[in-house]
Image: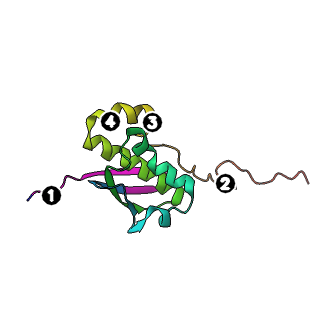
């Protein structure tokens, strides 16, 4: 008896790293052992993680299990989207042009800028006083 194929991928965004596992199923999304609507409380974040599935028409073809580490909820949602996109390409290489055109395969490089010495923050300076 052979097991149904599963496709694993890693997604990253800001400080978040997510391991995604796609298995043939009905479209359930489980993040850190919780359904997506319990883990991602904002509707916009749930929309973000479904974007690659909707672009490829695979919404109800795969069950998704994601293990998210680091960062905040928004960064994790972006990382899940990235991971799902990479796993979809592993499942069917013909989906690559669609996902590439949508920008789902590119890791978002934006991250927090470091605080500089002699300053209050990354860009903000200490207040200058004349007297």
Q: How many marks?
A: 4
Residue at the image point whose x is 49% and y is 63% from the top: 37
Q: Earlier in the sequence, mark 1 or mark 3?
A: 1
Query: Bounds of the magenta span?
Result: 2-18
Q: Which residue is mark 1?
A: 3
Q: Which residue is mark 4?
A: 95
Q: Which residue is mark 3?
A: 103
- Answer with left or right where residue 19 lies relative to residue 75: left
x, y percent for residue 68: 41, 61
Q: Earlier in the sequence, mark 3 or mark 2?
A: 3
x, y percent for residue 73: 52, 60
Residue 91 figure quarter: top left
Viewer can see residue 20: no
- Answer with left or right where residue 94 lies relative to residue 118: left
16 vs 35: above or below = above
Magenta span has 86? no
Q: CA distance from mark 1 to mark 3?
A: 32 Å
Viewer can see residue 108: yes
Q: Earlier in the sequence, mark 2 or mark 1?
A: 1
Question: Callout 2: helix, strand or loop?
Answer: loop
Q: Nearer the viewer, residue 89 or 24?
A: 24
Question: Residue 121: which disc?
Answer: 2
x, y percent for residue 77: 48, 54
Instruction: Specify the quadrant that holds the C terminus.
Output: bottom right
71 vs 85: above or below = below
* Of marks 4 and 2, the one in the foreground: 4
Question: Callout 1: helix, strand or loop?
Answer: loop
* Of marks 3 and 4, the one in the foreground: 4
* Of marks 1 and 3, the one in the foreground: 1
Q: CA distance from mark 3 to mark 2?
A: 31 Å
Q: Nearer the viewer, residue 30 or 83?
A: 30
């Amino acid at each position: 008896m052979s097991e149904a194929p599963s496709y694993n991928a890693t997604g990253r965004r800001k400080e978040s790293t997510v391991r995604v596992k796609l298995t043939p199923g009905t479209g359930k999304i489980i993040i850190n052992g919780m359904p997506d609507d319990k883990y991602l409380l904002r509707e916009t974040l749930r929309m973000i993680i479904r974007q690659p599935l909707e672009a490829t028409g695979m919404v109800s073809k795969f069950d998704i299990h994601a293990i998210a580490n680091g960062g905040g909820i928004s960064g994790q949602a972006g990382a899940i989207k990235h991971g799902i996109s990479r796993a979809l390409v592993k499942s069917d290489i013909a989906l690559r042009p669609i996902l590439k055109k949508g920008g789902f395969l590119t890791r978002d490089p934006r991250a927090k800028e470091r605080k500089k010495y002699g300053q209050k923050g990354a860009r903000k300076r200490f207040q200058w006083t004349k007297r």
